[in-house]
Amino acid sequence: MFEIVEKKFLAPNIVSMDILAPRVAKAAKPGQFVIVVADDKGERVPLTICDYDTEKGTVNIVIQTIGASTKKISQLEKGDYLRDFVGPLGRPSDYVNEDLEEVKKRKYLFVAGGVGTAPVYPQARWFKENGIDVDVIIGAKTKELIILEDEMREVAGNLYVCTDDGSYGFNGMVTAMIEELVENQGKKYDVIVAIGPMIMMKFVCLLTKKYGIKTIVSLNPIMVDGTGMCGACRVNVGGETKFACVDGPEFDGHLVDWDLALKRLAQYKKEEEELAKRGEEKVCTCQQGGAN
């Protein structure tokens, strides 16, 4: 059992929780994720790690209520317990294991869409802790859905906030913000890391491919079981079959077959919507996996 030691709302239907999990906190690295199970009847929900504190032994996760399982987790309160909290899983971001001096030679831009801001934060923080300035774009549909802005300002060299409806910051999607920085402001980037909705990452990659900028994406949204056993997160990367959970979750976005990946994302959508209406939870045969 894993205690929830802190809980707060970041935006409508978006909850931040600090979980007491010392072993996970000690081993966690940017880019990795955890599997969360609410109770004995709960399904496995993969969530990218937002933050971790080795001294307190806590791991921070951000949950957006989009289905029965995430709703169940979000309804838990401070002092309640999660049935399971397994991790860290997946491969850390590549730069973590690279020569630091080589990493310092590159200029990075992080692009965070919606709840994707949560997994971008520990990455930007890692760069800050290692004396490297990075630019960060945070995008959301409206101002009220912008999360972790203050936290991101503390770790980003330059932070650019944009909203689709123009209610806050730059008026436009994250792709328009990238165009503004590259084409109008003359910014030069060696690597772009884009994390957010699948469709957002696809269009970021289409744009950055035109610019010839290497782009890394996180395919966490299509993960189910988190161990590679269910096969639900199979994706074609550079003509090879990969599993988002064990081979990723981060991949070269220019090599991802986005049409296939988007089909994977929608594979349980109908069942999840039907069960959510009844307040139920889907349990499938793939190690109790399901769409989160």
Image (cartoon, rainbow, N blue to C red):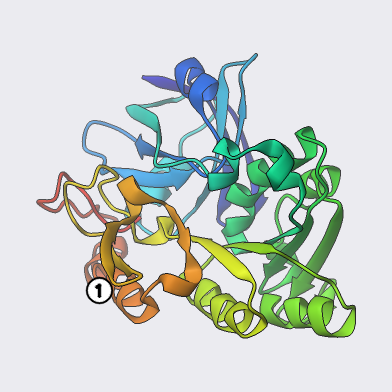
Q: Position of residue 22 (x, y in %)?
A: 50, 16
Up the image or down, 42 lies above or below 133; here it is above
Q: Which residue is mark 1?
A: 270
**Residue beneath the point at 49% across and 23% down:** 27
Direction from residue 143 to residue 270 in the image, left or right: left
Image quadrant occupied by the N terminus: top left
Element carrying mark 1: helix
Of 27 and 15, nearer the camera is 27
Up the image or down, 88 lies above or below 115; here it is above
Q: What's the residue type where badge 1 is placed?
A: Lys
Q: Is residue 79 visible?
A: no
**Residue beneath the point at 77% across and 33% down:** 129
Image quadrant occupied by the C terminus: bottom left
Q: Position of residue 246 (x, y in %)?
A: 31, 46
Of 241 and 49, nearer the camera is 241
Direction from residue 55 to residue 75 in the image, left or right: left
Up the image or down, 284 lies above or below 98; here it is below
Identity of the residue furthest to the right in this view: 185
Direction from residue 198 to residue 274 in the image, left or right: left
